[in-house]
Image: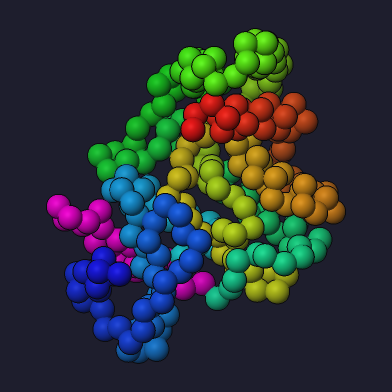
Amino acid sequence: MSSIHTVIEKLKLNVLYIEDVPESYSSEVYKLTLASGEHVFVKVPFNKDKLFREYQMLETLKDIIPVPTVLDIWYGDERMTGALLLSAIQGSPCSGDVDEKLSFQIGMYLAMLHEVSMPGYGYHMADGYKLLDPNNWRLHIRSNVEKWKEPCEEMLDSALFEKCMLYFDEAFSALPDPDGPCIVHMDFRPGNILVNGNEVAGIIDFESARGGSSEIDFTKVNRYMWEVSPSTKIPFMEGYQAIRPMLALESVLPFLRFLRRLQRNCLV
């Protein structure tokens, strides 16, 4: 709690109440009630790169999709990474049933996000925009798997390891060309979608967002929306395709699920 008092002092805020925001895993988040009665949020990322990443993404997207407004920023000191002061969006995380109208809107806003071009495959850091090495989405995936091979071989039965590598080679060669580089959220799930009834009120939590291929955002859409409530898939895709074409997900999603499981099982 001492960190929020430091931020309040640095940003010269007149605060009546401080509330912790639960389920924030890579930042400290607080809801503040100011003396004026206004509600705002303070986000204290765990490292400075996340601070700059979220700031840059919110500034880029502020006139494109509904995101929090950056009211102020503190760049930190030798003890703290800094903090963002964000406007409050009138809505709550999308935790209930998702009807066709809401599914359509969610798909539409993800497509609008993916329509924003980036200078390359990479991400914002405190010292500028860092391109992936290599700056090729498919080769970057292959490079990551090459790095995983040694720990995977140690963790997995030899026959299973060989089967996994064979699947990777076959599935990788059959992947469609990626799109992008465009903005990808990297954590696009109901908890980061704020709603009022069956209307999208805002999208939050851009500290992991970067320049990538749109396919990566569908892993969590599939896991947290389509698999939980299959009826959301068609209206979601209709909303998305009202803005831009959809990639060939039928081949990409199984491959990305495989990569996620391989990573979780071997890189612990």
Q: Residue at x 59, y 71 (%)?
A: 92
Task: Residue lying at the far left in this picture: please name it.
Answer: 78
Q: Is residue 165 above or below residue 185?
A: above
Q: Is 85 on the left or on the right of 252, as rendered?
A: left
Residue 248: in sight, yes or no?
no
Quarter of the view holding residue 65: bottom right
Q: Is 42 on the left or on the right of 81, as rendered?
A: right
* Quadrant in which the N terminus is drawn: bottom left
Q: How many marks?
A: 0
Q: Residue at x 67, y 15 (%)?
A: 160
Q: How is the image coloured?
A: rainbow
Q: Residue at x 59, y 59 (%)?
A: 191
Q: Is 25 on the left or on the right of 164, as rendered?
A: left
Residue 168 is situated, as x and y percent measured from the top left of the image, at 65, 16
Q: Residue at x 31, y 48 (%)?
A: 47
Task: Residue lying at the far bottom in this picture: please name it.
Answer: 36
Residue 55 is situated, as x and y percent measured from the top left of the image, at 36, 54
Foreground pick, 268 / 129: 268
Residue 118: in sight, yes or no?
yes
Q: Is 77 on the left or on the right of 221, as rendered?
A: left
Foreground pick, 150 / 189: 150
Residue 117 is situated, as x and y percent measured from the top left of the image, at 50, 39
Magenta range: 69-89
Q: Is residue 194 above or below residue 38?
A: above
Q: Is residue 133 above or below residue 113?
A: above
Foreground pick, 262 / 29: 262
Residue 167 is situated, as x and y percent measured from the top left of the image, at 69, 15
Quarter of the view holding residue 91: bottom right
Q: Is residue 246 magenta?
A: no
Quarter of the view holding residue 131: top left
